């Protein structure tokens, strides 16, 4: 039996056991969870933001060592002395997104106009992942910071007609729908609230895919943006490195393409709670780091080990179909429409293969690419393909000087300001000083 076959069988067996244990635990702990809600104001607060995050807090219980472990976006914002507003955006196809607006009273009292910035999170992430570095940095500079939670995250599981617990159709989406529905609706909502004609956007990982798809299919939507920062830009995926590169080539991934429409991963609260608790132990932290490093790349010098449980406990959910779309993209390289199989592709697209998204239609005069040499997903080879597929040269093409800067360094690096935030600040200052004035 080959190594790949053994790995494939191991993954199937592990998936079965994990799903079974999570299902049993979910049924056993539900009553206890809701009893706990009635006694703990902090849990009630978390439940109103994200029931799944609240459940994670209950499971971790008194073993939570850091208040940021399994913290909601609102709790993270408040813990740093900021205030926030919660807004709800309804998309054209009925999804109701929960978005956060950070309130910096010092910036407001200064009387200066606060230009809006929208931060778009990546795969298996939420607004919380921006709240370890960049969001506070931009808010302290006086920008009006908005944080989206894309459809399917634990913050955005409402719909005008569909129930995510009973209607499989709710989970029938990928990053394509996020691109043509979620982001346009949110941008227009922010413009309406702030009365600005344009906003700036920072996207990371999956967020960059979303922006690239949006601007390739809706090139004139570029007029709604001041600056478009794409951190770890992904338009091509065949060159990815690490363990993640093996997964799409395993038989088990084929099963996911046709899996029942549902949330991925199942039992998220238990994964986050037990993963966070496991990585609290100093004896286990090297194992946690090695897992990160083998899957997606991680720089040991730029991570605060004591924060590992925080990062582990903030993993988010999406749809199985979205995960399948990513896996397809690794095989196909160029980001394309979802592959339904030859027969359905012919009916939907008029071709046996799903069409590639037309990156050559993207206007580049406001586009800022920020990449690195240590990124396992947005490799320099793939970023170079993206550069050559665009309609012209990007406004700025910045390669981070630190060679070991990885895909997650944008979110978790202890030197995030020096290598990432500072670049955004300097580019923004130059643009708003010499570029178009707005508001």
Image (cartoon, rainbow, N blue to C red):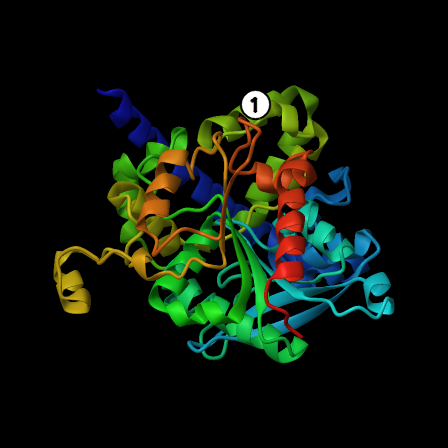
Quarter of the image for the N terminus: give it: top left
Q: Position of residue 184 (x, y in %)?
A: 48, 71
Q: Position of residue 108 (x, y in %)?
A: 82, 68
Q: Position of residue 267 (x, y in %)?
A: 51, 49
**Between 240 and 56, the one nearer to me in the picture:** 240
In the depicted structure, whether residue 364 falls above or below residue 220: above
Report the side of 150 relative to 435 (left or right): left
In the depicted structure, whether residue 431 falls above or below residue 417: below
Q: Which residue is mark 1?
A: 287
Q: Residue at x 48, y 43 (%)?
A: 232
Q: Residue at x 33, y 50 (%)?
A: 324
**Between 183 and 169, the one nearer to me in the picture:** 183
Q: Is residue 50 visible?
A: no
Which secondary structure, mark 1? helix
Q: Is residue 197 visible?
A: yes
In the depicted structure, whether residue 437 falls above or below residue 69: below
Q: Residue at x 81, y 58 (%)?
A: 82
| Residue 52 location, quadrant | bottom right
Report the side of 145 relative to 178 (left or right): right
Q: Position of residue 371 (x, y in %)?
A: 49, 40
């Amino acid at each position: 039996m080959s190594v790949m076959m053994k790995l494939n069988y191991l993954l199937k067996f592990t998936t079965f056991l994990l799903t079974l244990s999570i299902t049993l635990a979910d049924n056993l702990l539900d009553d206890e969870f809701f009893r706990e809600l009635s006694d703990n104001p902090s849990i009630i607060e978390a439940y109103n933001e994200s029931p799944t995050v609240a459940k994670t807090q209950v499971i971790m219980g008194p073993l939570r060592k850091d208040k940021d472990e399994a913290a909601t976006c609102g709790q993270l914002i408040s813990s740093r002395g900021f205030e926030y507003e919660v807004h709800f955006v309804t998309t054209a196809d009925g999804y109701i997104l929960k978005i956060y607006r950070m309130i910096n009273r010092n910036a407001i009292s200064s009387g200066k106009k606060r230009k809006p910035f929208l931060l778009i999170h990546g795969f298996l992430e939420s607004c919380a992942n921006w709240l370890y570095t960049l969001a506070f940095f931009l808010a302290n500079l006086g920008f009006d910071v908005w944080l989206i939670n894309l459809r399917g995250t634990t913050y955005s599981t409402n719909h005008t007609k569909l129930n995510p617990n009973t209607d499989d159709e709710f989970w029938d989406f990928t990053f394509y729908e996020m691109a043509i529905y979620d982001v346009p609706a949110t941008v227009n909502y922010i413009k309406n609230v702030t009365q600005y004609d344009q906003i700036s956007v920072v996207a990371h990982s999956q967020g960059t895919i979303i922006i690239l798809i949006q601007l390739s299919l809706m090139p004139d939507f570029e007029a709604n943006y001041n600056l478009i920062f794409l951190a770890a830009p992904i338009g091509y995926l065949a060159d990815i490195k690490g363990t993640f590169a093996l997964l799409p080539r395993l038989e088990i991934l084929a099963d996911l393409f046709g899996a029942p429409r549902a949330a991925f991963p199942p039992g998220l609260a238990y994964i986050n709670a037990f993963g966070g608790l496991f990585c609290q132990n100093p004896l286990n932290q090297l194992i946690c780091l090695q897992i990160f490093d083998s899957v997606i790349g991680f720089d040991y010098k730029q991570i605060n080990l004591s924060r590992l449980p925080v990062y582990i406990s903030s993993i988010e959910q999406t749809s199985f179909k979205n995960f399948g779309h990513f896996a397809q993209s690794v095989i196909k390289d160029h980001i394309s429409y979802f592959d339904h199989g030859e027969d359905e592709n012919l009916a939907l697209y008029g071709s046996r293969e799903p069409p590639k998204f037309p990156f050559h239609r993207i206007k580049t005069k406001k586009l800022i690419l920020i990449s690195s040499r240590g990124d396992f997903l947005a490799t320099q080879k793939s970023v170079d393909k993206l550069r050559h597929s665009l309609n012209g040269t990007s406004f700025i093409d910045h390669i981070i000087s630190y060679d070991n800067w990885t895909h997650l360094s944008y979110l978790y690096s202890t030197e995030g300001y020096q290598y990432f935030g500072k670049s955004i600040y300097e580019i923004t200052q130059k643009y708003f000083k010499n570029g178009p004035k707005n508001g």
